[in-house]
Amino acid sequence: MSVGRAKYSLLLTEGGGVIDDVITYRLAEDHFLVVANASNAEVDAAELTARAQGFDVEVDDASDRISLIAVQGPASEQILLDALLTDGSGVEGLTAEDLTSMKNYRFAECSYRGQDLLIARTGYTGEDGFELYLPDELATALWEQLAAAGGDRLTPCGLACRDTLRLEAGMPLYGNELGRDLHPAQSGMARVVALKSKGDFVGRAGVENVEVDDLPVLIGLVAEGRRAGRAGAAVRDAQGQEIGTVTSGALSPTLGHPIAMAYVAPSAAEVGTELVIDVRGKDLPVRVARMPFYRRG
């Protein structure tokens, strides 16, 4: 990975399970920024610190010093241009071309009110967008600046909204579709593991040696109406046999009907297969569908 690029990857256990999914930014030849899921920050920092033993590496957990603001959606680029490239914005070292020419999983470094600001074309919503990293003490000021520039084009939202977007985009989430007892191949994430590389890494042997053909696989499910299957709900086949569990589910605001992801037996994973989700004791007919459920234009 060259300097100036970012990569989505998995932090694995020795056995090939998933400790977390992370984005790593290569800031310099010898300087990397690893962004973890917030709930896993301490776990990931401890894992990386332990793995750095014996190497000429220093691990610094900056979680309590750095804030992240995500600006996502079709208007995100223009909002950043309006907010950051005007007189008095407090931003230096950034040009309009830096933003408009930035490809996915690239980033630019500049300064905001005299301190470091990293702007990356990354996100976990399935939409175009940016993630901005800066010191905690400046986060409120930047948030307010973005909100003022965005006006009616910008709506503040939290993780529940983000979760709906990533579900529509068919993107796995740690704690739902990813976990220590789940191998990347089960969720269709085997491509993320760098098995084509020659170097060894923690979890490589576990991924290469596991037989996943008979293990549950991640599928997409769609239904009619307004009721949605939620995480933990049982999935049954046409004969009433329980064959899996819903990991994420919602009434899709974009599509107008329920969608879900679930782990089921491989025999029930074929697109078009009719299944049933138990929604609070009532059957919800569903069928297996290809993911993503929605792809931005």
Image: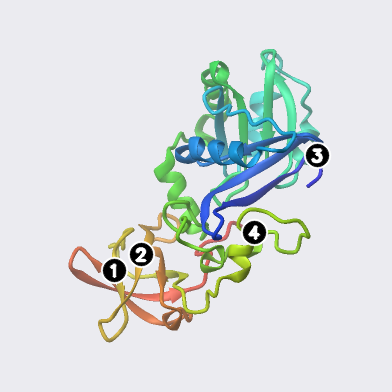
Give the percent coordinates (x, y) of residue 12. Answer: 57, 53
**Marks 2/3: CA distance?**
39 Å
Query: Which residue occupies the foreground of this view, 152 or 209?
Result: 209
Quote the CA–CA distance across marks 2 and 4.
23 Å
Pointer 4: what residue? Answer: 192
For marks 1 and 2, the one nearer the N-term is 1
Give the side of residue 120 with respect to residue 141, left or right: right
Report which residue position mark 1 lands on: 234
Q: Tell me the element at label 3.
A: loop
Which residue is at a point 82% across and 36% down the rendered structure image?
29
Tell me the amino acid under the disc marked 1. Ala
- Label 1 crowd bin: few (<14), some (14–19), many (20+), radius 10 Å: many
Q: Are marks 1 and 2 in contact (CB under 8 Å)?
A: yes
Q: Residues within 10 Å of mark 4 (few under 14, many from 20)?
A: some
- Element type where label 2 sits in the image: strand
Where is mark 2, residue-wise? 246
Q: Which mark is residue 3?
A: 3
Mark toward the start of the polypeptide (4 vs 1):
4
* SS under mark 4: helix
User: Which quarter of the picture shows residue 211?
Assistant: bottom right
Q: CA distance from mark 4 to mark 3?
A: 19 Å
Q: Residue at x 56, y 56 (%)?
A: 14
Q: What amino acid is found at the position of numbered circle 3 in the picture?
A: Val
Q: Is residue 248 left or right of residue 109?
A: left
Q: Quadrant of residue 133?
A: top right
CB atoms at circles 4 and 1 under 8 Å apart? no
From this view, report whether residue 241 is shown above or below residue 167: below
**CA distance separating discs 4 and 1:** 29 Å
N-terminal of the two: label 4 or label 3?
3
Q: Position of residue 292 (x, y in %)?
A: 53, 64
First reached walking from the N terminus: tag 3 or tag 1: 3
